[in-house]
Image (cartoon, grey):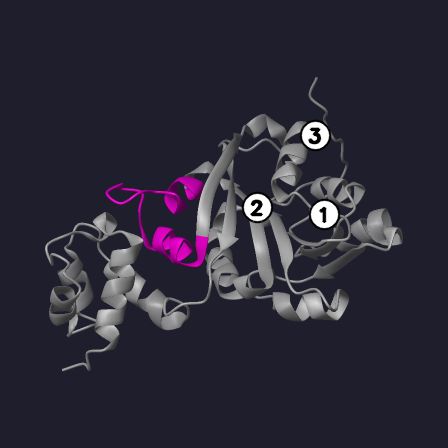
Amino acid sequence: MVEKIEYSMRAKRSLGQNFLVDGNYVSKIVNAVHPEKDEVVIEIGPGRGALTRELLERGAKVLAIELDRELVPKLRDDHGLTGRFIVVEADASEADLRELIDQFYPGTPKAKLVANLPYYISTAILQHLSAERHCLSKLVLMFQREVVERITAKPGSSERGYLTVLVEAAFAVERLFDVPPEAFRPRPKIWSSVVRLIPKAQSSADGDAFRRFLSSGFSQKRKTIANNLKRSYPEAAVALADACIDPKRRAETLELSEWLRLYDAIAVHPKP
């Protein structure tokens, strides 16, 4: 029998809120996080606290980041007395995670992170989490299924794009399971999917320069990689030859290793 979690507060369409109410999927997501006793878990967008409650029941210390100011006092009332719950009113796509961990749970080298995220914030939050990953050991994220299909797309897939390679460069990615619309209130029109990300070590692909490079590479999907890059990188033709990449290929056919090789090749060539 499916356990339904009942709430009274109304979701805000402006914030893309769809609250998870199916207890079975709450448990599956928390199982994927696998919190140890007294381990710090950052929860982005706790909403009405379904995941929060189970994380606390399993012994985790929860640092919640909630944008909706009307939900913050309710979350504090419900969970603040546990001594293992902190909620911060902030935009998670801009929050300094290392600073928050040090402020509220000093001495914690790395935290796990879990989130149920609306479609509109997907690119911004993934860019931010890529940059902040040095303080995280594991991320379990739920997006609309379309977003997860994009970030797990293989070379040659039409779904493969800027966001795919950005995430691949920062994380080892594993798609876990899908979540049906009826698991939420209000019920969305689409399915959701849960993905697990394990942070990779820092590399030359970190920072705004690599993001600009990827954005140029994927700027027009019907054009070749050479045509896309040459406007922003006049040295692209030489770099493509040095990286042993056919300039007639399209961006979505390149593997991560080829993107990294090409980026390094461009970096060593001064612009003509």
Could you tell me which residue is drawn at 23 percent across and 43 percent down?
156
Pointer 3 with pointer 1, Cβ within 8 A:
no
User: In which quarter of the view is residue 3 placed?
Assistant: top right
Could you tell me which residue is drawn at 17 percent across and 58 percent down?
225
Q: Is residue 208 magenta?
A: no
- Please tell me which of labels 1 and 2 falls first in the chain: 1
Residue found farthest to the right = 81
Can residue 218 be seen in the rendering of this structure?
A: no
Q: Is residue 168 left or right of residue 129?
A: left
Residue nearest the observer in this picture, 267 or 13? 267
Q: Amino acid at mark 3?
A: Gly
How far separated are the C-alphas under marks 1 and 2? Answer: 15 Å
User: How packed is label 1: few (under 14 Cα within 10 Å), some, or many (20 or more)?
Assistant: few
Looking at the picture, how far across and down is residue 191, in whole percent?
A: 50, 32
Pointer 1 with pointer 2, Cβ within 8 A:
no
Q: Is residue 8 left or right of residue 125?
A: right
Image quadrant where one finds the N terminus? top right
How far separated are the C-alphas under marks 3 and 1? Answer: 20 Å
- Residue annotated with mark 1: 36
User: How packed is label 2: few (under 14 Cα within 10 Å), some, or many (20 or more)?
Assistant: many
Can residue 170 be seen in the rendering of this structure?
A: yes
Looking at the picture, how far across and down is residue 47, in whole percent?
A: 69, 46
User: In which quarter of the view is residue 269 placed?
Assistant: bottom left
Q: Secondary structure at mark 2?
A: strand
* Label annotation for residue 23: 3
Q: Nearer the viewer, mark 3 or mark 1?
A: 1
* Label annotation for residue 140: 2
Q: Amino acid at mark 1?
A: Glu
Looking at the picture, how far across and down is residue 158, in whole percent?
A: 26, 42
Q: Secondary structure at mark 1?
A: loop
Residue extent of the magenta highlight: 147-171
